[in-house]
Image (spheres, rainbow, N blue to C red):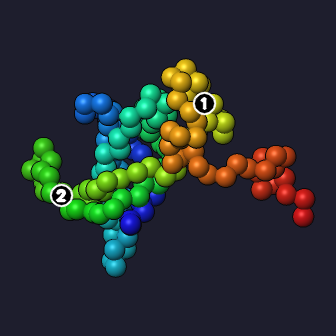
Amino acid sequence: MHTVPFRLKEDAQEFNTGEYTGFGIRTGVKYQDRNKQDQWTNYKAAIFAKSPAQVDFYRANLIKGALVVVTAEKQEVELFTKQSGETVAAIKLINANVVAVKTDRAPDAAQQAYANAAANSGVGMQSQRPAAQSAPQQPAGFDSFEDIPF
């Protein structure tokens, strides 16, 4: 299992595949090589959702600037040619799943949007809950590390 955390540089590209809705995400992670030159590792993945609540959640949260953690069973190197003629490699994440999403919205906005979509579609929160919602809730009364009383 491979885990890749990154920030989305653009909104996910939505597409339909029969009864599923897919979301294509791409990003690049910058690092420095031995000569302190900036280099990039490019990643791409397709995330699939079936329930209306999951589709609405991904649509609302796989947006430019979101922090996303993706897991994948396998990775595959894919080469593509830019319009400039330059050949670039990307790591394609196979059978990818979103395990966490953080956006700049109010902390409860994503959860509220998901709850509203689930209520309107008749989908049970527990049975169709996306993995991104499984993080433990923050204890009441602590809005930041500044509030810790020691």
Q: Which residue is mark 1?
A: 115
Q: Name which residue lies at 28% across and 56% down.
A: 94
Q: Residue 35: percent from the left, percent from the top? A: 33, 77
Task: Answer with the quarter of the image where residue 34 lies.
Answer: bottom left
Viewer can see residue 112: yes
Q: Amino acid at mark 1?
A: Ala
Farthest top residue in view:
120
- In which quadrant is the C terminus drawn? bottom right
User: Element under label 1?
Assistant: helix
The disc placed on residue 78 is 2
| Vertical placement of residue 66 versus 95, above or below | above
Farthest bottom residue in view:
34
Q: Residue 143: percent from the left, percent from the top? A: 78, 47
Task: Answer with the quarter of the image where residue 38 lies.
Answer: bottom left
The disc placed on residue 37 is none
Horizontal placement of 130 versus 92: left or right? Answer: right
Viewer can see residue 59: no
